[in-house]
């Protein structure tokens, strides 16, 4: 049996975390949760998730964007697809990130609230069907 | 700004008279300015476009493009450039016309070096002021735009959580362990709608304070009565948190001049904060006095306190302490900001004294109520 694919969800809203985690777990993904950028980095390095769902506004600032940058600059993590999920924008914003943290082809922007069916489809397309 | 040795300001001089160009350049260079001179309007305008000077000195009477035209074209390049026109005695009328079309001032020929220095300095000062106020305006606009973005994000956050719960419930309705979860999620959704309600009402209160409609009413208001009422209301909520509410206000009325509903909002905020950010076994004590034409009210709690580094931001809109030491309490981040606005509107003051881990004391000072002058006594001269 192939191991389950692992999704790291980074968000400071615990209700959002709970709802999305529950849905993904029901669809046979293993879910890791982080409530801040710092926690996300720690978990990502330790667990090497297959995909990351990243919120932008955490606390009073756009911590998510900095965390995307950090991930892209970390050699062992930089290939992980990131889906940025935020209610700050309606459509993919022009992220002004540094060149070495550039938006990659496997990345996505999803406006919150996230449509669960669509999310599942997009995740499966990136990381393959869950075991 | 003290750190950067600012590049010298550039001044462009456009005059067909060689001697004039030479002496202007010498005087301006001595003032520490970068002076560039041009002999006619066409070259002068090219120079202005390329050099982006702070100030242009232009002779009104030149062959080729007239000085008047130079004035209007310079402002097409950059309306912030200060223009000083040089005129002969006979052409004061034209000077006035030039000033009507945007020149800052004029120098009648012949003029002394001092006159040139004076007018150039004044012009450059004026430009600095204009640029500074423009900068302040831009910053204000930016802040406003960010504020709107931030507010809509704050409003959307609970809405997103509710939507997400409902969406997942819709898809996972038949699971075995979903029954308990379902109940819990409904409760959480209700909590989040409450958060949304609070945010909207705080936001409305703030808008009303800013519009001045909340504090328009100025009547005699007894804080003893208002605060006594608030303390009664929260007795139960405080008891549930294990916090004692103490009314240490004096017997006599503490009267200020203000809007009662506004004053209620103010002390309601301070007292509920005292309860929310407290610990079991703690207390909130409200005391007050009248002294020197002011009523002072102190709301002291024995709660978690406010770490010193956060104190400067405490009254900012949407500021919330996110710290492991701070309890995760529901709040909109607007309460203290609203309180501060209300106090300001009433010409009072609010400050805080706090020790992390030991508690905080908020002190409000408001002008005491003064009986209106009785007209029969005549007015004080």
Image: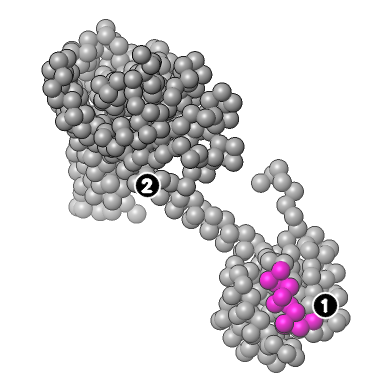
Quadrant of the drawing holding the C terminus of chain B:
bottom left
In the rendered view, does B37 fall on the left or right side of A72? right
Judging depth in this view, the residue of B242 and A23 nearest the camera is A23
Q: Is residue A109 left or right of residue B84?
A: left
Q: Position of residue A103 (x, y in %)?
A: 50, 40
Q: At which x and y percent is residue B227? A: 20, 27
Residue B2 drawn above or below residue B266: below
Residue at x 40%, y 12% (from the top left corner): B357
Does the magenta-highlighted stretch encompass residue B98? no
Crowding around mark 1 (Cα neighbors within 10 Å: few <14, some 14 to 19, many 20+) is some
Q: Along the line of sight, which residue is nearer the eye, A59 or B365?
A: A59
Prevalent SS, magenta region: helix
Left or right? Give the position of B97 relative to B88.
Answer: left
When asked about the image quadrant of residue B86, the answer is: bottom right
Q: Nearer the viewer, residue B154 or A56?
A: A56
Q: Quadrant of residue B156?
A: top left
Is residue A18 or residue A122 the one in the foreground? A122
Residue B43 painted magenta: yes
Residue B188 location (% of width, % of height): 20, 24
Residue bearing the label numbered 1: B21
Q: Chain of mark 2?
A: A
What residue would you read off at disc 2? A91
Q: Provide residue B367's location: percent of width, then percent of height.
A: 31, 38
Stretch of the chain drawn in magenta: B39-50
Circles 1 and 2 in contact, beta carbons < 8 Å: no
């Amino acid at each position: 049996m192939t191991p389950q694919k692992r999704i790291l969800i980074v968000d400071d809203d615990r209700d959002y975390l709970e709802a999305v985690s529950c849905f993904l777990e029901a669809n046979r993904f293993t879910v890791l949760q982080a409530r801040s950028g710092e926690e996300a980095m720690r978990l990502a390095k330790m667990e090497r998730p297959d995909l990351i769902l990243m919120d932008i506004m955490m606390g009073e600032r756009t911590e998510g964007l900095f965390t995307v940058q950090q991930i892209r600059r970390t050699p062992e993590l930089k290939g992980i697809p990131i889906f940025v999920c935020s209610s700050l924008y309606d459509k993919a914003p022009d992220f002004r990130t540094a060149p070495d943290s550039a938006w990659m082809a496997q990345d996505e922007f999803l406006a919150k609230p996230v449509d669960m069916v669509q999310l599942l489809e997009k995740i499966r397309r990136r990381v393959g069907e869950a075991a | 700004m003290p750190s950067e040795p600012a590049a010298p300001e550039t001044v462009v001089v456009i005059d067909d008279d060689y001697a004039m160009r030479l002496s202007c350049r010498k005087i301006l260079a001595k003032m520490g300015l970068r002076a560039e001179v041009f002999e006619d309007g066409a070259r002068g305008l090219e120079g202005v476009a390329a050099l982006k000077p702070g100030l242009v000195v232009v002779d009104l009477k030149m062959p080729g493009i007239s000085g008047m035209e130079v004035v209007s074209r310079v402002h097409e390049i950059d309306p912030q450039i200060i223009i000083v026109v040089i005129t002969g005695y006979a052409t004061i009328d034209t000077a006035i016309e030039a000033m009507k079309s945007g020149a800052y001032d004029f120098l009648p020929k012949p003029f002394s070096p001092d006159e040139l220095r004076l007018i150039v300095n004044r012009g450059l000062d004026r430009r600095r002021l204009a640029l500074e106020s423009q900068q302040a305006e831009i910053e204000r606009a930016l802040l406003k735009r960010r504020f709107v973005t931030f507010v809509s994000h704050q409003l959307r956050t609970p809405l997103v959580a509710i939507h997400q719960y409902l969406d997942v419930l819709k898809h996972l309705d038949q699971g075995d362990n979903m029954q308990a979860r379902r109940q819990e999620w409904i409760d959480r959704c209700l909590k989040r709608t409450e958060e949304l309600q609070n945010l909207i009402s705080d936001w409305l209160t703030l808008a009303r304070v800013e519009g001045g409609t909340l504090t328009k009413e100025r009547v005699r208001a007894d804080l003893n009565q208002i605060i006594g009422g608030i303390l009664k209301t929260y007795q139960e909520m405080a008891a549930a948190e294990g916090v004692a509410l103490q009314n240490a206000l004096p017997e006599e009325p503490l009267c200020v001049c203000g809007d009662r509903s506004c004053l209620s909002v103010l002390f309601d905020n301070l007292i509920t904060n005292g309860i929310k950010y407290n610990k079991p076994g703690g207390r909130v004590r409200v005391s007050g006095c009248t002294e020197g034409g002011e009523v002072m009210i102190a709301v002291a709690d024995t709660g978690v306190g406010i770490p010193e580094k956060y104190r400067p931001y405490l009254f900012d809109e949407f500021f919330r302490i996110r710290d492991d030491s701070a309890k995760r309490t529901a709040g909109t981040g607007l309460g203290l900001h609203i309180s501060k606005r209300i106090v300001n509107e009433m010409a009072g003051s609010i400050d805080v004294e706090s020790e992390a881990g030991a508690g905080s004391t908020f002190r409000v000072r408001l002008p005491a109520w003064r009986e209106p002058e009785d007209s029969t006594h005549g007015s004080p001269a």
